Amino acid sequence: MKLDGLDTPSVLVDVDIMTANLDRLASYCRDHGLNLRPHVKTHKNPELAQLQIRKGAVGVTVAKLGEAEVMADGGIEDILLAYPVYGEIKWKRLAALARRTRISVALDSLEVAQGISRHAREGGVRIPILVEFDTGMRRCGFAIGKEAIPVVERIAELPALDYQGLLIYPGHFLKDPERRKQLLAVENRQLSTLLDLLNDAGIPYPVISASSTPTAYMSHQFKNITEVRAGTYIFNDRNTIGCQAADLKDCAVSVLATVVSTSVPGKAAIDGGSKTFSSDKFLSGDGVGFGHVIGDPGTVVEYLSEEHGHLVLANASRQYRVGDRVRVIPNHVCACVNMHDRIYGIRDDDVVTEWQVSARGAVQ
Ligand SMILES: Cc1ncc(COP(=O)(O)O)c(C=O)c1O
């Protein structure tokens, strides 16, 4: 099918750019002796996860147990749930999942570790765990300090858990390259303190799982990390470009939309809004707008109503007429893809494949 035959709004993925993105990070990880465990929240599709594994990934990362179940159903055999899970219902599901695939879990409390341990023991399975530390993101993770060490020791001794090491998430590196360099120095000081504390206590850390898309190619400069969990890198997005972690030419994703109104002078409305793009902000770069209009960077996607996007044309380099089609790079691809049942793989003007966003809605 040609692109013209596709209804709008539709999420497009340039297959050749995506493949190059996958190959580049896989080869970087190979060259630096790092394991690659891509975060699949970006595409939520087991076939793309399988492709990442065929290209050398050791397994995948997910944020939700529901995503893990979809990945296991799709044949993925090594999954890291990089977030703590709490409650009897979840722990029971986790133990059931552990019977059919390798599922490891990151956590940062004794409560969660004890719950998982109890259910794993009752279910007759062992669950690998990583202990999360906060190196600056201020989201999850034990504070780095000697107070955390006895808790790690207690977690590591719990029955039916296999302590594997540490997890950190440098999500606060969505900044320009100079700032990322400064943050790396802070990060490595934090990691040194943590590793000294663990060494003094005789606690090993065979795995240190880390990284994000903005830090992916700096991973070898992070002290002692063994695993790279980038997710967005498969497609990239406006935020990745804004912090110069990728160029426009490395961005595989865009939303194909149709101009549906030009009645208001200086404005155009397209048929995709917050329920197409998500309302996620442009957190890097100048922070303005909700997307990058391909071929017309002066046009601002000023705001999104639920189903429509509103373009300001003051600095447009082209005319907009009702019925024109535009392609817009979303600010945050993971949230955008999650709005859609399927995404389309394209090569030039041809639609060559489609993928179901199978784990969308798998929020539990
Ligand atoms: C725990 C964790 N690891 C890895 C990633 C991947 O980061 P990125 O989307 O920058 O590739 C995320 C993203 O949210 C995350 O939450």
Image (tube, grey):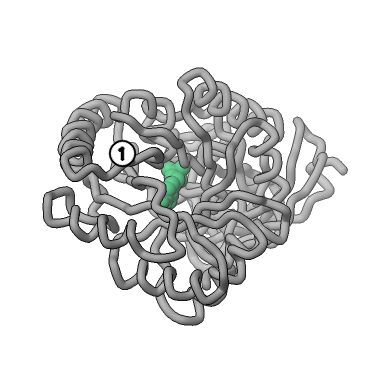
Left or right of 87? Residue 175 is: left
> Vertically, is 78 above or below 245?
below
Closest to the observer: 162 or 345?
A: 162
Vertical placement of residue 162 versus 218, above or below: below
In percent of width and height, residue 278 lies at 50, 59
Q: How far across and down, in percent of the image, does residue 240 sit?
A: 43, 37
- Say which quarter of the image contains residue 340: bottom right
Single out the residue that lies furthest toward the top.
31
Q: Residue furthest bottom?
A: 88
Quarter-of-image position of residue 12 = top right
* Quadrant of image for the N terminus: top right
Residue at 56 percent across and 62 percent down: it is 308
User: Viewer-proximal residue, 208 or 316?
Assistant: 208
Residue 314 in view here: no
Residue at the right extreme, as displayed: 1
**Front-most of 182 and 239?**
182
Q: Position of residue 324 (x, y in %)?
A: 69, 46
* Residue 148 percent coordinates (x, y): 18, 56
Q: Residue at x 79, y 42 (%)?
A: 3
- Residue 356 shows in the view: yes
The residue wearing badge 1 is 173
Q: Residue furthest left?
A: 146
Q: Residue at x 43, y 60 (%)?
A: 161
Tell me which amino acid carries mark 1: Phe
Could you say whether the residue bearing mark 1 is in a helix, strand or loop? Answer: helix
Please indicate whether residue 112 sits to the left or right of residue 252 in the image: left
